[in-house]
Amino acid sequence: MKIKYKFTTQHRQRISAALTGKKRPEEVKLKVSKTMKERGVSVGKNNPMWRGGSPKLEYNRIHKYLRDLGEQKRCENREDNILEFKCTSVENKQYDYALINGKKHAKKRKNYIMLCPSCHKRYDKTYLNFKRVKTKI
């Protein structure tokens, strides 16, 4: 039977300080990996905290992809009249990418249109039937 010791906070801090910056040799890493696999460590779908993947991660990746396309500089509705309504706003400093109705979130520029905030709101209201609720901030 193995005896378990309860370490004080001070003792744990000293151990942590002593091990900080030290790296494990490759053979130790392989041994730990092998042991974890043998024990059946909960990884992926076997983990009780699994939530079916992480859609939030994918959402964040797509937004990073859109940011990396470059600075949003124009309202495509103002210049190309691609929507049923006309853009009435003057030049803005901020533009957003809106997902085109019927398309899926993906790393494809053709699935998105660049709109000014007023067109984006009107687009969401018109095409996506969002119910806007006034909230006090």
Image (spheres, grey):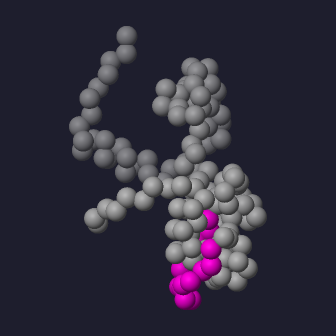
Check the image and report above or below for 7 versus 108. above
Query: Which residue is more in the foreground, 117 or 106?
Result: 117
Could you say which quadrant of the image residue 6 lies in?
top left
The answer to whether residue 109 is seen in the rendering is yes
Residue 33 coordinates in the image, percent (x, y): 62, 31
Instruction: Work out whether residue 95 can be spotted.
Output: no
- Residues in magenta, as a range: 85-98
Whether residue 110 is situated above or below residue 26 in the rendered picture:
below
Locate residue 60, reporting x and y percent. Answer: 57, 57
Q: Is residue 76 magenta?
A: no
- Apparent side of residue 26 relative to residue 93 in the rendered image (left or right): right
Residue 27, placed above or below residue 108: above
Give the image quarter of residue 71.
bottom right
Q: Residue at x 57, y 77 (%)?
A: 116
Q: Which residue: 61% across, 42% down?
A: 25
Instruction: Name the residue nearer the viewer: 67 or 133.
Output: 133
Main SS type for the magenta part?
loop
Q: Which is more toward the observer, 31 or 49? A: 49
Q: Quadrant of the C terminus?
A: bottom left
